[in-house]
Each structure stands twice: as C-alpha cells, then as structure tokens.
Image (spheres, grey):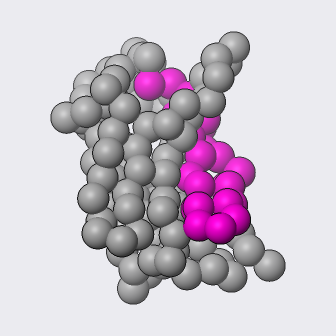
Amino acid sequence: QFQLVESGGGLVQPGGSLRLSCVASGLTLSWYNISWHRQAPGRERELVAEISRIDGRARYADSVKGRFTISRDNAKNTVYLQMNNLEPDDTAVYYCKARAVYEYWGQGTQVTVSS
C-alpha cells in the first residue's frame, strides 16, 4: 500500500518557523517529483514548492520565495518543507504529493500562524 504521511504542523506566531516532513511508505520518493501544496478555508489548493526527481531543482510560489525551502533526504525516503518567517496568510492545511506516472497525496497537516 502506498502512503504519504505529513507531520510537523502546528500553531506558530508570526515570524516563527516550522519544518514539515513527508514520509513515504510503499514507494521510493527519489523516483518522483515531490511537491507541497496548501489549502486555506474557502480557497483553492495551491502549489507551494516542488522539487524535481531528475536534478533536484526546486521551484516556489512567489508568495513563499525566500521564506520556504523544499529538500529531500532519499536515504530517509522523506521530503521536507522548511518554513521561516511565517505569516498569517500561510495558515492552511499542507499536503505533499508524489508525482510520476501516477500521483499520490498525503492526508495533510494543519499549519496555523497566529498571535
């Protein structure tokens, strides 16, 4: 059974940091393009960051450039999203996705940025 499990979400004050993790079971993440997405209440799900399986290059949504960093640890079969200088608008459920011929989604982890 293929499964992605996100963790690391929580409540943080504006300006704070969180690191999200996405751990895979049943699939080898190095074979996939991995992306993080988020969905806030009443809004569509949006791409936050993506890392290529071929060359490891990353791309980011304009709203998070310079604050978020996506990385992968193939030995741990895990992808991370380091989020710094968080803002209230970053509040959302964050999902990871693995994409090749098929795509797989995790169940999401809640991030709340509030004072």
Instruction: Specify whether residue 82 is in view.
Output: no
Q: Quadrant of the N terminus?
A: bottom right
Q: Is 107 within the magenta? A: yes
The magenta region covers 90-111
**Residue at figure coordinates x 41%, y 50% from the top left:** 50
Q: What residue occupies the far front of the structure in this picture?
A: 101
**Is residue 46 toward the left or the right of residue 4 in the image?**
left
Does 97 sit above or below residue 90? below
How many numbered marks have been drawn onto this rendered protein structure?
0
**Residue at figure coordinates x 49%, y 59% from the top left:** 34
Q: Position of residue 89 (x, y in %)?
A: 44, 17
**Residue at figure coordinates x 65%, y 46% from the top left:** 108
Prevailing secondary structure of the magenta residues = strand
Instruction: Specify whether residue 30 is in view.
Output: yes
Does 108 sit above or below residue 16? below
Q: Position of residue 36 (x, y in %)?
A: 49, 47
Q: Is 23 within the magenta? A: no
In the image, 67 versus 31, the foreground residue is 31
**Is residue 45 toward the left or the right of residue 34 in the image?**
right
**Is residue 26 toward the left or the right of residue 47 in the image?**
right
**Residue at figure coordinates x 59%, y 61% from the top left:** 99
Does 54 sit above or below residue 35? below
Does 55 sit above or below residue 66? below
Q: Quadrant of the C terminus?
A: top left
Q: What residue occupies the far right of the structure in this picture?
A: 1
Q: Position of residue 65 (x, y in %)?
A: 25, 33
Figure quadrant of residue 14:
top left
